[in-house]
Image (tube, rainbow, N blue to C red):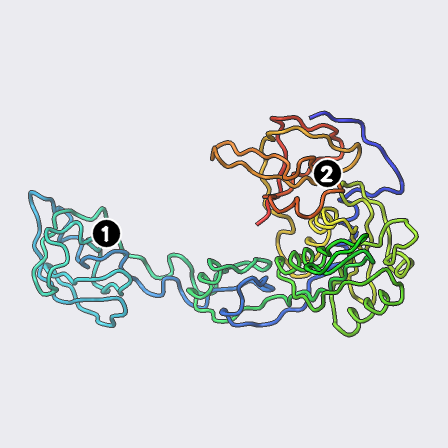
């Protein structure tokens, strides 16, 4: 990589400075209790503690025979041990046979182990496997030690122990662990309610006839989808022309009627003469320049308790801005432990330039052909130019985040790639 001395400007915020200012006024939303069946994709507001021991009782880890270890401690193919089978214990059995020397109980995985048993012999270590339950069993291999193949009560978790910490995203594995610990409902943070407003008189609905000077509108689809992917609830999606009165009414409705916790707008934040977001919201939210590419013009503020984001109108700029600023805020509103995407450090397969003194967000494709040496290349021909349409993002596996000090990324350089799902 080629680097350059950093430039400084009192009017230009770094990405970190702008994000820090946003997170400073972003607190977790209230919690609510939901049944486990409705908790997938939600964020835990409070740590879940086990209601029961896990396992709940001593149980067999194998299909085989519950035995006294002393009976079979010397068993071998040349000197097998024959035991009388006195019980059959499938999973869910409540029987409690008493094992005395020379006795065994056929037992299935997960079944309660008799209190008198001191080991389980897997069926593979017997001569004929699982024969009729009341036939004698011949053991040809000794268990390794007393307690072999017995899962002891509470060896994984004791009642009252933490299962999943607060701030965790609840997926299938977390929900399974919670259910196994005897808990049927969890406290989760309320989903953020988000209104998306795409601005621009040039925008036409996708699928409609596009006349000269008009373009298909895509930002509302982009931003609403990105918000949903974070766990947010979309309460309104709209596209408005560059009309100050119409835009002002739409913002007022989003905050006071739709009850949005967050409003995300696109377009209208630059310094032109028809910048509807700036015209209406200047003085109520801050309009700043951020040292990033794409996405330099940004706006953010709080209006009547609602977080209001003003993102650039170019789709590539809006997408990068969402990653840098909106997504972390939506996760913080849910009390999420981590506010960043998983990141890999990989070598790049193609060179590109990065603007001086800007943190660059380059949509990249990952080549996974060699599992031990993934590589990345720009998903669009010219990297992350702000002029690229959103279609260029369709092939992206993540964003290569290039520090502001770097001016040239060369083939073979290692870069940090924030992974997209």
Question: Is disc 2 surrounded by few (<14), some (14 to 19) or many (20+) residues within 10 Å?
Answer: many
Answer with the quarter of the image where residue 385 lies.
top right
Q: Quick one: label 1, few (<14), some, or many (20+) residues within 10 Å?
A: some
| Mark 1 or 2, nearer chain start | 1
The quadrant holding residue 224 is bottom right
Marks 1/2: CA distance? 61 Å
- For the residue pair 356 and 378, the one nearer the viewer reads as 378
- Left or right, 209 with respect to 249, comes to left
Check the image and report above or below for 90 versus 218.
Answer: below
Label 1: which residue? 146
Q: As drawn, is 369 to the left or to the right of 13?
A: left
Residue 131 is tagged as none
Residue 382, image x and y in percent?
70, 35
Image quadrant occupied by the N terminus: top right
On the picture, is 361 further left or further right than 113?
right
Which residue is the site of mark 2? Answer: 360
Q: Judging from the image, what secondary structure is the residue with disc 2 in? A: strand
The image position of residue 13, as x and y in percent, is: 83, 43
User: In the image, which is nearer the foreground, mark 1 or mark 2?
Assistant: 2
């Amino acid at each position: 990589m080629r680097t350059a001395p950093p430039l400084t400007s009192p009017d230009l915020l770094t990405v970190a400075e702008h994000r820090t200012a946003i997170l400073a006024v972003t607190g977790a939303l209230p919690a609510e209790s939901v049944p486990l069946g409705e908790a997938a994709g939600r964020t835990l507001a409070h740590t879940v503690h086990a209601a029961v021991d896990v396992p709940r009782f001593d149980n067999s880890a194998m299909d085989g025979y519950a035995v006294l270890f002393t009976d079979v401690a010397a068993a071998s193919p040349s000197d097998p041990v024959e035991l009388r089978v006195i019980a059959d214990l499938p999973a869910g059995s409540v029987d409690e046979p008493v094992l005395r020397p020379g006795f065994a109980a056929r037992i299935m995985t997960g079944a309660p182990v008799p209190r008198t048993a001191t080991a389980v012999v897997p069926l593979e270590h017997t001569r004929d496997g699982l024969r009729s339950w009341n036939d004698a069993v011949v053991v040809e291999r000794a268990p390794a030690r007393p307690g072999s193949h017995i899962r002891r009560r509470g060896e994984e978790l004791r009642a009252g122990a933490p299962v999943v910490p607060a701030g965790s995203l609840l997926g299938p594995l977390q929900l399974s662990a919670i259910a196994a610990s005897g808990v049927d409902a969890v406290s989760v943070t309320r989903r953020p309610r988000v209104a998306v407003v795409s601005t621009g008189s040039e925008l036409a609905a996708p699928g409609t006839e596009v006349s000269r000077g008009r373009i298909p509108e895509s930002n509302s689809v982009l931003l609403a989808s990105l918000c949903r992917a974070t766990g947010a609830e979309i309460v309104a999606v709209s596209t408005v022309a560059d009309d100050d009165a119409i835009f002002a009414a739409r913002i007022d409705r989003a905050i006071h009627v739709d009850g949005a916790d967050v409003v995300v707008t696109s377009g209208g934040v630059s310094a032109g003469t028809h910048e509807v977001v700036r015209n209406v919201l200047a003085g109520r939210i801050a309009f700043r320049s951020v040292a990033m590419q794409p996405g330099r013009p940004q706006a953010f503020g709080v209006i009547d308790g609602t977080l209001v984001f003003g993102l650039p109108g170019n789709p590539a700029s809006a997408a990068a801005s969402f990653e840098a600023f909106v997504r972390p805020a939506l996760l913080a509103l849910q009390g999420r432990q981590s506010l960043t995407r998983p990141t890999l450090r990989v070598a790049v397969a193609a060179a590109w330039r990065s603007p001086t003194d800007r943190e660059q967000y380059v949509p990249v494709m990952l080549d996974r052909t060699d599992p031990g040496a993934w590589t990345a290349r720009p998903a669009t021909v010219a990297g992350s130019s702000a002029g690229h349409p959103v279609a260029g993002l369709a092939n992206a596996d993540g964003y290569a985040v290039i520090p502001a000090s770097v001016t040239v990324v060369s083939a073979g350089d290692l870069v940090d790639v924030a992974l997209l799902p």
